[in-house]
Image (cartoon, rainbow, N blue to C red):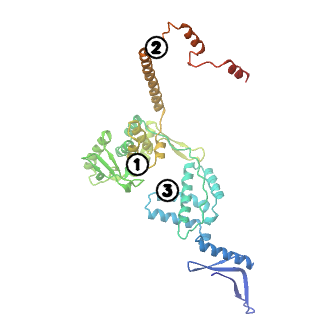
Amino acid sequence: MGMLYRRRKRDPLTGQMIVLSPWWIKFYDHGRPIRESTGTTDKAEARRRLKQKEGKVSEGVYQGPQVERTKFEDLIEGIRQDYTLNDRKSHRRLNDFILHLSASFGNMRAKAITTDKINVYIAKRRGQGAANGTINRELGCLKRMFKLAYQQTPPKVTRVPHISMLEERNIRSGFFEHEDFLALRGALPDYAQVAVTLAYYSGMRMGEVCSLEWKQINWNEGKLYLRAQNTKTETPRILYLTGDLLKVLATWKQRCETKWPSCSWICHRGGVRLESLKHSWRKACQHIGLGRMVKDEKTGEVIWDGPIPHDFRRTAVRNMVRAGIPEKVAMAISGHRTRSVFDRYNIVNEADLARAAKSLSDYFVREKQASMGTLAGTLAELPHAPNHEEEPELIGIAEERMELARGIEPPTCGLQNRCSAD
């Protein structure tokens, strides 16, 4: 049972108790006493608010005063804890997102983060030259923060603000033709050639490539096993080693056993695990004319304009589809979990369109030849085929009423008049 009361204070001069404003309410949530100020001196209004609070408690929808005190920093703490408990690998990216979000929402109460303020944040990041995809990743992080806080018991927020995602027009569509891949591989140092060969033929992410160890290869069966903890989707995969890929790995294995016998990593540089191809990649691309460093007109920064190692991923998907590999099998090899991502990477170029047009043209030629042969044979085999020599008048009438090009009746005079009048 709740109660109303007003706080009192003893006057230091007179010693009398002075009633302070406003009215306070006291009620219980699962036996826990809760005291809140009503903010009013009207006793009837204070009683109404007490009944309202008790009603929420009885319905099980009372959120508690902690919702009012939840700040943006509390949301950050929640998502960091989620990353730690689930052993997520992208802590560095999370720190980047938090850095940008904190510049606008730092020290702000969670309930004050509204859609309007989020739209202001979007405009600010666009003014800073951030791409729509980058902004969407940051907004996704913010939405995740609110969802985690909402799912707490008791919840830290009462609602998740509406966050509109931007349309991404900067989805990469680059891929490598086989000749470009061979030229790039030839321009790279030995240690990088192994990594790009694995990425090109398998569609593995570069992080997965750099995590491979020699013990994951079964040379007798010609298989490479990807462990679940080393894949982005945490799903183990098997890659069969054949052709050029098997030859490159076998040659590299012999060299490693001679020079670096104690190194367990497949992709390494002088026995030290390979972490990135950034420097050697750009140098090789510039050498063969595939990319260059340019100045961004918006930000004034010097950025890379050319292919990136992740382009091998969509290239592998496209090559597998061209080779006739079923899409489900191709997704299992490349590690794509959703069909939407697979479709986005399965891109075509002008050569694909030219081949499609040639195939369609050849199809019509074959169909025409087949239909002509079938029609000639059918007419000759009909037991009651009309004799054109015996019915010249009927044929003449038919020819007058038929259009030679399309084989359909010409429009009537009335229809022609109406069309011309319109």
Task: Say if mark 2 contacts mark 3, CB within 8 Å.
Answer: no
Q: Residues within 10 Å of mark 2 (few under 14, many from 20)?
A: few
The residue under label 2 is 385
Q: Is residue 341 left or right of residue 17?
A: left
Residue at horizontal 37%, vertical 49%? 209
Task: Say if mark 1 contacts mark 2, CB within 8 Å.
Answer: no
Q: Residue 265 appears at what percent x and percent y? A: 32, 52
Relative to 187, say whether 386 is above or below: above
Q: Quadrant of the N terminus?
A: bottom right
The residue under label 1 is 335
Q: Earlier in the sequence, mark 1 or mark 2?
A: 1
Res. 93 mark: 3
Is residue 65 among the parts visible in the rendering? no
Q: Residue 86 appears at what percent x and percent y? A: 44, 62
Q: Residue 379 appears at what percent x and percent y? A: 44, 16
Q: Where is residue 26, by image quadrant? A: bottom right
Helix, strand or loop at label 1? It is loop
Q: Residue 387 appears at what percent x and percent y? A: 48, 10
Relative to 305, say whether 404 is above or below: above
